């Protein structure tokens, strides 16, 4: 990857939509730092193996081939359902009279859905009202006046539906998504794995262990595709990616930490296998 790409200040894409999810480790607050590294790469195929709440996927311009993936099965079922007009209509009409209260949260949490539609509804309700959007062993986390009320949730679904059309949505290990042969001419991967050190044990169903960080780095070292990777700024990650281009950043992020604080200012890394340089108007990379 010898070419140098010119990085520009972040501008919202014409098809920008806000993620409908609340998500631990979500990158909504980091878009202005991450998107310039993505927007500077010409590509007709985009893959996001750790999509989570999808802040970057929903923000970026859709290209010819798009593939989002996550190991979290319940979350991926919701993405798949939200790409279906019929389901979106049914869920959105049920949301008309929905309320976000602790009592309703407990009721939904203890509910045993008997249909696929009910299951999707339950997962989405829990995501919107739990602490940090955590679906797995959720705790009440909705804050009156601060959190988005149920009346907005319907709009989220209607807004994202067009963006999900034609997108491949899968539930597998990241390695399969990186290894798959390309369909387009130029593939760009954006990867946002669980942090190396952040205290996110509660956030995801399956732990991401040291060996997972190592196999990710090994696979990325040998990929022919362009990649942009975001990580916490720790020595171990810098060592794992000493062969790549490493950019240091600071941004606010949502995490599920021990102190119960939902948002923390963190030192972060954006790592790429391509060189970038700024134009003279944009000096903040
Ligand atoms: C930091 S979060 C991604 C957040 C996302 N960028 C956003 O803006 O919401 C990391 C994601 O990796 C997923 N994950 C963990 N292990 C995985 C694996 N082996 N393969 C694919 N996804 C995995 C988790 O379920 C989680 O959704």
Image: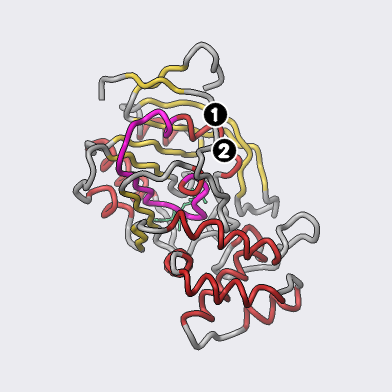
CA neighbours of label 2 inside 10 A, class few (<14), some (14 to 19), many (20+): some
Write down the quadrant of residue 190 in the picture: top left
Residue 155 percent location from the top left of the image? 62, 60
Q: How many marks?
A: 2
Q: Is residue 53 magenta?
A: yes
Residue 277 percent location from the top left of the image? 42, 17
* Secondary structure under the numbered disc 2 in the rendered image: helix
Magenta segment range? 37-56
Q: Residue at the top extreme? A: 280
Q: Residue at x 28, y 48 (%)?
A: 178
Tell me the mark number nearer the camera, choosing from 2 and 1.
Answer: 2
CA neighbours of label 1 inside 10 A, class few (<14), some (14 to 19), many (20+): some
Image check: 142 left or right of 81? right
Label of residue 249 in the image: 1
Label of residue 30 in the image: 2
Marks 2/1 in contact by CB < 8 Å: the verdict is yes
Label of residue 25 in the image: none
Question: CA–CA distance between discs 2 and 1?
Answer: 9 Å
Q: Residue at x 74, y 73 (%)?
A: 99
Q: Is residue 183 magenta?
A: no
Q: Residue at x 62, y 70 (%)?
A: 125
* Secondary structure under the numbered disc 1 in the rendered image: strand
Near-viewer residue (100 or 231): 100
Residue 2 percent location from the top left of the image? 26, 20
């Amino acid at each position: 990857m010898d070419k140098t790409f010119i990085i520009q200040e972040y501008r919202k894409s014409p098809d920008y939509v806000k993620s409908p999810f609340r998500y631990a480790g979500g990158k909504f607050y980091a878009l202005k730092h991450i998107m310039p590294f993505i927007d500077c790469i010409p590509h007709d195929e985009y893959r996001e193996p750790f999509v989570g709440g999808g802040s970057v996927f929903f923000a970026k311009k859709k290209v010819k081939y798009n593939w989002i993936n996550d190991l979290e099965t319940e979350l991926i079922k919701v993405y798949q359902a939200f790409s279906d007009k019929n389901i979106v209509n049914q869920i959105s009409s049920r949301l008309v009279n929905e309320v976000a209260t602790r009592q309703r949260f407990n009721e939904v949490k203890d509910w045993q859905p008997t249909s696929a539609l009910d299951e999707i509804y339950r997962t989405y309700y829990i995501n919107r009202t739990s602490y940090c959007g955590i679906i797995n062993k959720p705790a009440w986390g909705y804050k009156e006046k601060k959190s988005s009320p149920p009346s907005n949730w319907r709009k989220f679904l209607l807004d994202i539906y067009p963006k999900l059309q034609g997108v491949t949505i899968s539930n597998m290990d990241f390695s399969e998504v990186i290894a798959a042969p390309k369909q387009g001419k130029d593939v760009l991967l954006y990867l946002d794995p669980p942090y190396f050190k952040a205290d996110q044990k509660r956030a995801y169903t399956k732990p991401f262990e040291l060996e997972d960080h190592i196999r990710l780095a090994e696979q990325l070292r040998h990929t022919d595709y362009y990649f942009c990777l975001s990580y916490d700024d720790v020595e171990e990650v810098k060592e794992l990616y000493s062969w790549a281009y490493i950019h240091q950043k600071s941004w606010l992020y949502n995490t599920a930490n021990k102190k119960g604080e939902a948002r923390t200012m963190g030192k972060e890394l954006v790592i790429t296998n391509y060189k970038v340089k700024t134009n003279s108007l944009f000096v903040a990379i």
